[in-house]
Image (spheres, rainbow, N blue to C red):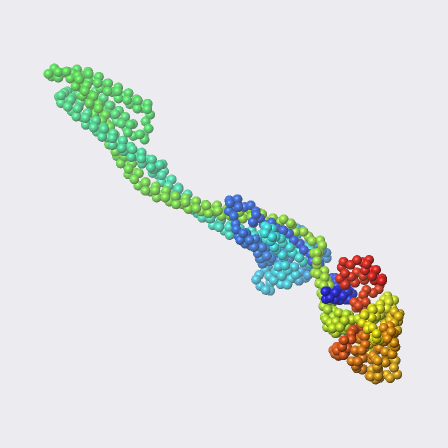
Amino acid sequence: MKYITYFIKFFYRIRYWLIFAPLIVAILVYWQGRNTSHNYTANCSIYTGIITGVNILSESGITTTSYTQGSMMDNLLNIITADQTLKQVSLRLYARIMVYGDPNRDNIYTKASSYRILYDHGIPIHDLINKSSENDSINEQRTYENLLAYETNDPSNYVYGIYQWNLPYVNRASLQKIDVRRVGASDVIEVSYTTDDPGIAYQTILILIDEFNKQYQELRFGETNNVIAYFQDELKRIGNELANSEDSLTLYRVKNQVINYEDETKHVAALNRDYELQYWQSLNNYNVSDSIKRELEKRMFLNAEIIKNNNSFILYNNIISEINEKLAIATYYSQQSVPQSVIDSLHYELDKNKKALSDALQKIGYLKYSKEGISNENVIDEWLKQVIAFKKAEAELNVLSRRKTHMAQKYIHFAPIGSTLTRKERLVDINERRYMAILDALNTALLKQKSIQMNSASLKVMNAPYYPLVPSTISKHKLLTIGAYIAALIFTIFFFLIIEILDHTIHNAFKAYQLTGSRLLGAFTRPLSFSGRRYNKVYTTISAQTLCNSAVTYFKPDQSNIINLISNEPGEGKSYIMEQISQQFTERGFDVTQLSWQNEFNADAQAFIQSFNLEDLDTDEKSNLKDKIIIVEYPSLRDAALTANILQNVSLNLQIVDARRIWKNTDQNIFERTRKMSGATPLFMVLNYTKRDAAEDVNGLMPPYTFLRKLVYRIVQLGLTANDKTYEQKIKH
């Protein structure tokens, strides 16, 4: 607790130093840096939409891990702070300043002073600055293109060094001060830039946002576009191969008149089966009719030859054969479409000629009977019937024989087509599969491109950059002033603290106890000047009263109360203190006797001590001893040595110490020897010429009793909850 009180007193004692020293230093720093430029900050926020934004992949149910999301955000931060991006910003910013800047006045692009610095430094490339157009944006673009065309990888090239040199505002060191960070775990990127030129700060952020979009688009779309171009070329090439193979298949089908090979071959097989059945049926009919006809001709003997040689028979027989052949062709050659009316007409002609042939035979009357007189009419009719059937079967066999040749040609035609069609269709299928695979890959690449486009479209500026009209909240000048004030304050505290720790001056009760191990019994203030001099007498009275009050407690009854005033050095105020306490004791009714070695005729200090006898002082009656006080002032211990008899046979020993002088090791040695020689007699220290604050440690609060002094005293004494009225009444009493 005492250390807390001590430090409070310590800070209060150096209060003026703590107030004025840092303040003076801060004022000097502020005055010296009054012309220091202020910093301006331009910032913006960009919404990326990479994590929470809607894209094709997220709509398809494909999610990304937190690690992937973090990597994507890190990639964005790396893109915006990459050297390639900052270099483009550097050249574009330089071109914009050179085009829009004005050496005589500030504008939203740059200050006049900044423009002059960059313009004067860039004398080698003044020819690259284009201001020929009335449109400054065109001039800026042309200047930027001129800078790019002029740049080479040569240290002597000025444009190459714009980004590398220590050129203010546009060099690498300046642009790397751009602060880019992700806001928490969101999709938002915050970009801020601080410099002493508000226009350059604003334009730098604008150009950086534009370059960031370009670099992002180029990096994200570059690889995807190359892949898409490759797949498109492959798709075109394989598409041409597929088209050629399909055209070849089509030409082959047309050339060989094949529409559906499987159905056609099935149809050919079915026709061949029907042909075989019909052929054997017709051959059987032919053989049967021929056999019956021959048998009937044997019965008819020469009549058959006569009929066969008959002109009408021959005529109608040939006509019937032709008609049967036409009907057979119409029946067995289904690919030759014959109208039903023609077929009906042929049947009609066949029936007509059959009847005509029958009528012609009926006219040959001598054939009705044989030479034996037997009737031949039934035989001739049967024979004619068989002749007609024979002719029909014969015509069918002729047609079917030609049909057999036709069917053989069909087999010869379709046999090689099958394998060729299979090979060509397989080639078409392979090309089609390749085409579909490339098409799927192309669609995937296009889907990814569209997803990237959606992500890129979501790169939106939430808070657009604005031109800073006022400096930053705390500029470098203010920070420097505040830092100087704090540094001066800390230095002052540590300076006085070191002095306080190393100081061997007993200027208060705490130091007295720390240096000597003895407590103070009284403290007298040094004479004050100016406004405090009117309290000098009051302070002396209070100090004397406090010392007397404390000394009385050590008085012994039934003997003279002797108080020894001693000091290590001469001139420490023993005479003054003796006078003040003598006056106080006298006012209280005590019989006070003052003995001082300075009043003796023998000025030798040691002689005074040797001739001094304490027993000679007790000459009065015992009843009066309790009211008698003898105050003895001895010479300084540096000039004379006291005896143990003098120090022990008294009521109280008071070591007077000048608070203004150093307490040396010799002083401590003398004090220790004095305390040891005093034995059981109390030995206390009394400070003289001390400060008012130190005197208050012993005497209590001293006037003036202002509110501030009372408040500080309460704080020092840790009376945080004391009653002010009660405390003031105690002070008055």
Q: x and y percent of residue 414 in the render?
A: 31, 38
Is 365 situated left or right of 168 in this image? Answer: left
Please name the residue shown 29% across and 27% down the image.
Answer: 330
Q: In which quarter of the image is residue 611?
A: bottom right
Residue 82 in the image, given as x and y percentages of width and height: 58, 57
Of 305 and 354, the residue lying toward us: 354
349 relative position to 514: left or right:
left
Q: Nearer the viewer, residue 453 or 702?
A: 702
Residue, x 78% and y 74% (percent of image)? 682
Residue 107 seen in the current view: yes
Q: Which of 12 and 39 is in front in this view?
A: 12
255 above or below 634?
above
Q: Which quarter of the rendering shows the N terminus?
A: bottom right
The x, y position of residue 586, in whole percent, is 88, 71
The residue sitting at 15% across, 24% down in the picture is 294
**Residue at the location (56% across, 51% down)?**
217
Judged left or right of residue 251, residue 56 is right
Q: Where is residue 556 in the image (x, y as percent from the top left)?
A: 82, 73
> Is 169 drawn above or below residue 270 in the view shown?
below
Could one spot residue 126 in this view of the protein?
no
Against 725, residue 336 (above or below) is above
Depth order, front residue of 531/726: 726
